[in-house]
């Protein structure tokens, strides 16, 4: 099975313009809040009508603006987990799940219910109503109900967002197992890059309503090629860039010239991950420059240092974040002047 979506929708504040193709895999839609991820799922599910476009799932055309096709939600065979779970409030957990079972499946309803209750940790809650469940419990029941409906595709909108840290980790493992068992197409919406990295095989970045090309998760995190994808992959350091010769870039905001291994002919920015900035130790190092320590912050397992390069310009990109294992550089203090190094291979050329 697969989902192809080409969707355009004027939303007033911005225009949704996305296109992607997902096969039998878990594909993430990664973007900041309000970028259009949930609206995209709503269009595929048939809850929202696009202004124009084409949506095909499992070879069946769900929407085609040119041909006037717009199947109702109940005929799309696509399971969508809403952010508010959308359980029937006047039905018990058991009744919520039974309501989506096909007639054939109802013959084995008791076994299905028991299996789902064990897998999604709501055994003993089958006779309760949604109002008697916690947010996490409602979420688990809602995911189980989607699996029970036997969809050709599953769409999950921030499915782990309301869970506490321990339960989120536990439920994530169960969810991955359930999606592997499902084996069909899954679209997974999240603003959490860690979830996308652990759960999805491919990812489509959406920024300001526009989609980027689908790529593997490894490609996104190892070599993002746009400013939006670099930010969403967790990169913290950026500067406007000017190519000044083969293999060399002027980092405008930092006031330094850096050697860059990757092709940078079309780069408007460069990005450097915080853990690739390190204290200069070796005389043979390239890309070294002087910075003033603005602030040293202790995280649970790491130390974070905010730096300002000596010749930095004022602006949004004037500071650099350096992150390293706790106590690796105990000598660094607020107000110090230090020299740092960034390896040429760790500089990411970025388009806008």
Image (spheres, rainbow, N blue to C red):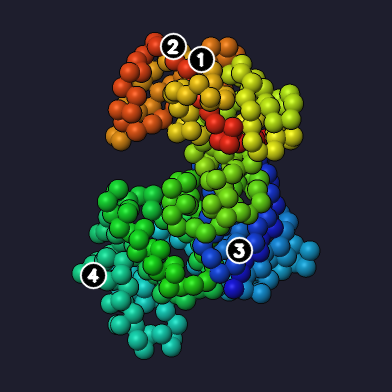
**Residue on which the image places disc 3:** 22
Residue 327 occupies quadrant = top left
- 100 and 188: which is toward the camera: 188
SS at badge 2: strand
Q: Do the residues labelled 3 and 1 touch (CB within 8 Å)?
A: no
Residue at mark 3 to residue at mark 1: CA–CA distance: 46 Å
- 278 and 164: which is toward the camera: 278
**Callout 1: 10 Å neighbours few (<14), some, many (20+)?**
some
- 135 and 278: which is toward the camera: 278
Residue at mark 3 to residue at mark 4: CA–CA distance: 34 Å
Q: Earlier in the sequence, mark 1 or mark 4?
A: 4
Residue 18 coordinates in the image, percent (x, y): 66, 52
**Residue on which the image places disc 2:** 337
User: Please, is residue 179 above or below residue 327 in the view?
Assistant: below
Residue 226 occupies quadrant = top right
Q: Which mark is residue 123?
A: 4
Q: Do the residues labelled 4 and 2 touch (CB within 8 Å)?
A: no
Question: Which mark's residue is nearer the viewer, 1 or 4?
Answer: 1
**Callout 2: 10 Å neighbours few (<14), some, many (20+)?**
some
Q: Do the residues labelled 1 and 2 touch (CB within 8 Å)?
A: yes
């Amino acid at each position: 099975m697969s989902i192809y979506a080409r969707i355009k929708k004027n939303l007033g504040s911005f225009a949704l313009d996305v296109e992607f193709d997902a096969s039998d895999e878990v594909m993430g839609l990664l973007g900041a809040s309000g970028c259009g991820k949930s609206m995209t799922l709503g269009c595929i599910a048939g809850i929202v009508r696009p202004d124009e476009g084409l949506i095909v799932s499992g070879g069946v055309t769900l929407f085609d603006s040119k041909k006037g096709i717009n199947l109702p939600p109940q005929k799309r065979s696509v399971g969508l987990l809403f952010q508010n779970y959308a359980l029937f409030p006047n039905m018990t957990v058991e009744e919520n799940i039974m309501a989506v079972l096909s007639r054939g499946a109802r013959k084995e309803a008791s076994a299905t219910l028991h299996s789902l209750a064990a897998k999604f940790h709501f055994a003993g809650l089958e006779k309760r109503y949604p109002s008697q469940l916690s947010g996490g419990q409602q979420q688990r029941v809602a995911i189980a109900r989607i699996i029970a409906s036997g969809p050709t595709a599953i769409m999950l909108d921030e499915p782990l967002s309301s869970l506490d840290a321990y339960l989120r980790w536990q439920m994530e493992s169960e969810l991955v197992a359930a999606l592997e068992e499902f084996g069909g197409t899954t679209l997974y919406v999240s603003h959490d890059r860690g979830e996308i990295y652990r759960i999805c095989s491919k990812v489509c970045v959406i920024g300001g309503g526009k989609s980027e090309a689908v790529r593997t998760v490894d490609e996104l995190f190892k070599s993002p090629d746009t400013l939006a994808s670099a930010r969403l992959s967790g990169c913290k350091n950026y500067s406007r860039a000017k190519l000044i010769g083969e293999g060399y870039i002027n980092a405008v905001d930092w006031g330094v010239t850096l050697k860059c291994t990757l092709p940078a002919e079309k780069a408007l920015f460069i990005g450097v991950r915080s853990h690739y900035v390190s204290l200069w130790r070796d005389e043979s190092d390239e890309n070294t420059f002087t910075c003033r320590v603005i602030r040293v912050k202790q995280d649970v397992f790491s130390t974070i240092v905010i730096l300002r390069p000596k010749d930095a310009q004022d602006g949004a990109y004037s500071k650099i974040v350096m992150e390293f294992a706790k106590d690796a550089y105990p000598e660094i203090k607020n107000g110090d002047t230090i020299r740092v190094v960034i390896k040429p291979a760790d500089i990411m050329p970025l388009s806008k």
